[in-house]
Image (tube, helix red, strand yellow):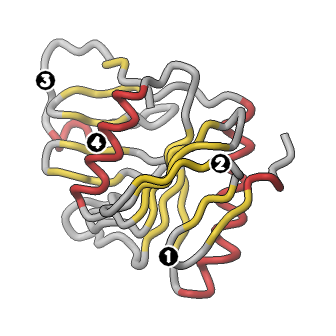
């Protein structure tokens, strides 16, 4: 989630961003490419755990569970949550491979370089876009926050939930 901007000779267009590829996908904010940090061991293990466990719970209900998927939260902003739960495949007519409808859940797993300001900015963008649930998780403690439109809940017991499912991070093996 770190917001280290990749140096370019100027601002680029959405179309240029969408044609670019990155070793570790980058985000796009108002004409700037925002590099995402390479995941730590704990980040990667937690992400794999969440993808597997949430898929097992949510897929039977018709949800798609995907990792590092571009989500267009505004015309000039694309974010790449670590885990994303959507109720439908992306409409590929305008933006191939980009989620343009609000996901049910976006999960941000913190990296050592992330700041609270950056994390909250993403949470606000997701919620403004219409995402129902946003989890922000510290991979070293498996604690964090659950955000929804109505409230923020601090998670100390390692149990993250939405209105449809819950995941116990005490089961993660690092």
Residue closer to the observer: 126 or 13: 126
Q: Answer yes or no: do the residues labelled 4 and 3 have beta carbons within 8 Å? A: no
State the residue position of label 1.
Answer: 163
C-alpha distance separating marks 1 and 2:
21 Å
Rounded to the nearest angstrom, the CA distance separating label 1 from label 3 is 40 Å
Q: Which residue is mark 3?
A: 11
Is the Cβ of the residue at disc 2 closer than 8 Å to that at disc 4?
no
Q: Which mark is residue 19?
A: 4
Seen at 61% across and 37% down, the residue is 138
Q: Residues within 10 Å of mark 3 (few under 14, many from 20)?
A: few
Q: Residues within 10 Å of mark 2 (few under 14, many from 20)?
A: many
Say whether disc 2 or disc 3 marks the residue closer to the N-terminus.
3
Of residue 76 and residue 17, the one placed in the foreground of this image is 76
Secondary structure state at the residue bearing disc 2: helix
Q: Up-down: is 42 above or below 90? A: above
Q: Which residue is drawn at the image coordinates 52% and 85% (left, top)?
A: 62
Q: CA distance from mark 4 to mark 3?
A: 15 Å
Few, some or many residues within 10 Å of mark 1 (<14, 14–19, 20+) = few
Mark 4, secondary structure of its residue: helix
Which quadrant holds the C terminus? top right
């Amino acid at each position: 989630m770190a917001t280290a901007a990749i140096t370019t000779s100027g601002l680029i267009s959405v179309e240029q961003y969408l044609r670019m590829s990155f070793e570790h996908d980058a985000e796009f904010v108002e004409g700037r490419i925002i590099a995402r940090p390479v995941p730590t061991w704990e980040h990667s293990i937690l992400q794999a755990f969440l993808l597997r466990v949430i898929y097992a719970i949510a897929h039977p209900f018709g949800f798609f569970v995907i990792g590092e998927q571009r989500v267009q939260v505004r015309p000039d902003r694309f974010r790449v949550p670590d885990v994303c739960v959507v109720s439908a495949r992306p409409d590929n007519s305008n933006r191939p491979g980009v989620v343009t409808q609000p996901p049910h859940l976006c999960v941000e797993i913190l990296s050592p370089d992330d700041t609270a300001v950056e994390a909250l900015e993403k949470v606000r963008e997701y919620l403004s876009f219409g995402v129902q649930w946003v989890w922000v998780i510290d991979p070293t403690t498996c604690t964090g926050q659950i955000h929804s439109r109505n409230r923020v809940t601090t998670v100390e017991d390692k149990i993250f939930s939405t209105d449809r499912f819950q995941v116990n991070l005490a089961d993660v093996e690092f």
